[in-house]
Each structure stands twice: as C-alpha cells, then as structure tokens.
Amino acid sequence: MAATATATTTAMEGIEATAAATTTEAAAGQSAAIPEKYMHKNRLQEFAVRTQKKLPIYNVEREGEYHHPKFRCTVEVGGQKFSSTGSFSRKKEAEQDAARVAYEILAPIEEGDVNKEVFGLIDQDVVFCKSILYEFAVKTKTARPSYSEDCLKEPFTMFVGSVVFDGNTYTGESASNKKDAQQNAARAVIKSILATGGPDHVAPASQDESSSLGVQEHSIVPAVGTSANPSAKAVSGSKKRKGRVGGADVNGTMVAKEH
C-alpha cells in the first residue's frame, strides 16, 4: 500500500505542476498582454522544463534574395526536430512557428503518458477507485455513482458489482466481497473515461484490458493517501489540448500543416 501511495503522490505532483505552470494569474496576465502568435516559444520552454528535457535549440536558415530574405526554422526538443510550416519574413516568426509545431505534437503525447501511469496505479490496487470516481463526479457536476451487487454462489460465493454513472451502467470483475466488487465497478468506469474521453464520450464497458488511450478531455488522478474517504481524494479535470499529429519528412523532421 505504501508503494501505491508513493506512486500516487508522484502522479499528483506531475499534474499539479502542469496546472500551476499553465493557470497561474501571472501567466494569464502575460497571455493577455502578448499576442498569441508570440507565446509558442514560451509554452515550449515551459513544456521542456516540466518534462525535464533540455531547453529547445533553434536553428534558423536564410533563403531567398539578399534584399528580400525569407527564414525557416528547425527546433530540437528532447532529441526530436520540428520544422516551421513555411518561410517567414522575420526570424522570430519562423522560430515561433517551429515552436508551435513542436508543442502541438509533443503536448498530447505527454498527456497520454500521464494517463498510462494512472492505469497502472488503479490496476495495482482498487482501493482508490470509488473515491476517485466520486470526486470526479463532483468536479464535473455529474450525478453521484449508484452501486449494486449480484451474488454468484456457484461454485463458490462471489460478488459482481455494477455502477450507474452519467446514465450508463458499468460492470466490474467479480470479487470475494461486496466492497471490492464495488471498487472493481468504479475502476471499469475510470478506465472507460481514460480511454474514450470525458463523461460525454464514455461508453459502458465491462472491466477489461482492451481499451487504448486517446487524447483525453478529463484526466483522472488519484490523490495522496490511502483512506477510502471520498473527501481525502482528488480528481483533476482538465480541458483537452487540441493537438495535431504531425508527420515526418524525409530527414525525420516532424512537421505539421500550416494554420
């Protein structure tokens, strides 16, 4: 249990650091003062710091006539290179565009990695699942989960839990007691949300391992502690970042479509 709590603490610290870096009043004030097109380098640098990567390295190439130059930029982040979508009349504009391309490709990948970690946590121990789902319902203003259990007496007594959440019914794996059966049902809901998006996109699902991660509208994160009290847990709901999947050119450099 101590190992689970430690891992849970790590996951929460990562989410809290991400939220702090993007939602502080200072950052909001800066965003209002600086035009959006000049914010991409700042975002990419914050991303590099947050994910413990080397700071971005920009390489600007000049092309065109001497009296009418154009500039292209390539930025390297975490061993990957990303190119601007075209040529620009100013170096700074080329750098900003390359930073935008890099961030829009890398940010969704980071978010997916966080949810993979949460998958691992709830597989190790289901003790958090009911509390996580309860706090998620509070956070998203969804009706509280409603649980029920069926008793299976052959060949020996087992319980199968079901939960109604956001108008859908989910069934978990069987367990030797009602408490664990309810936790397994809650885990089925959490995995479905992580795999398919927020509660508006959740499909009823039994407890299985076949789901794959996508870009999430809500990130469900266990809080610190081992208490089953819902008030001692936390669930973080964050709007999904609109990322764009880029392709690779013949040199292995990532590119994205121009806005």
Image (spheres, rainbow, N blue to C red):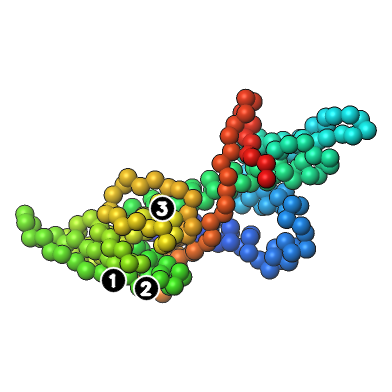
Determine whether the residue tagged by mark 3 lies in a helix, strand or loop: helix
Quadrant assignment, res 149? bottom left
Looking at the image, residue 231 lies above or below residue 99:
below
Determine whether the residue tagged by mark 2 lies in a helix, strand or loop: loop
- In the image, what residue type sits under mark 3? Thr
Residue at position x 58%, y 45% from top?
244
Q: Is residue 69 left or right of residue 84?
A: right
Q: Is residue 226 left or right of residue 236?
A: left
Q: In this view, does 128 lie to the left or right of 64?
A: left
Instruction: Identify the disc placed on residue 196.
Output: 3
Instruction: Identify the disc placed on residue 22.
Output: none
Q: Do the residues labelled 1 and 2 touch (CB within 8 Å)?
A: yes
Q: Which of the two discs, 3 and 2, labels the residue nearer the N terminus?
A: 2
Residue at position x 26%, y 69% from top?
147
Q: Toward the viewer: 70 or 211?
A: 70
Cα separation between marks 1 and 3 = 21 Å
Cα separation between marks 1 and 2 = 9 Å
Residue at position x 39%, y 65% from top?
132
Q: Position of residue 101 (x, y in %)?
A: 65, 43
Q: Toward the viewer: 151 or 16?
A: 151
Instruction: Identify the disc placed on residue 143.
Output: 2
Q: Position of residue 83 (x, y in %)?
A: 69, 36
Looking at the image, residue 179 lies above or below residue 77:
below
- In the image, what residue type sits under mark 1? Ser
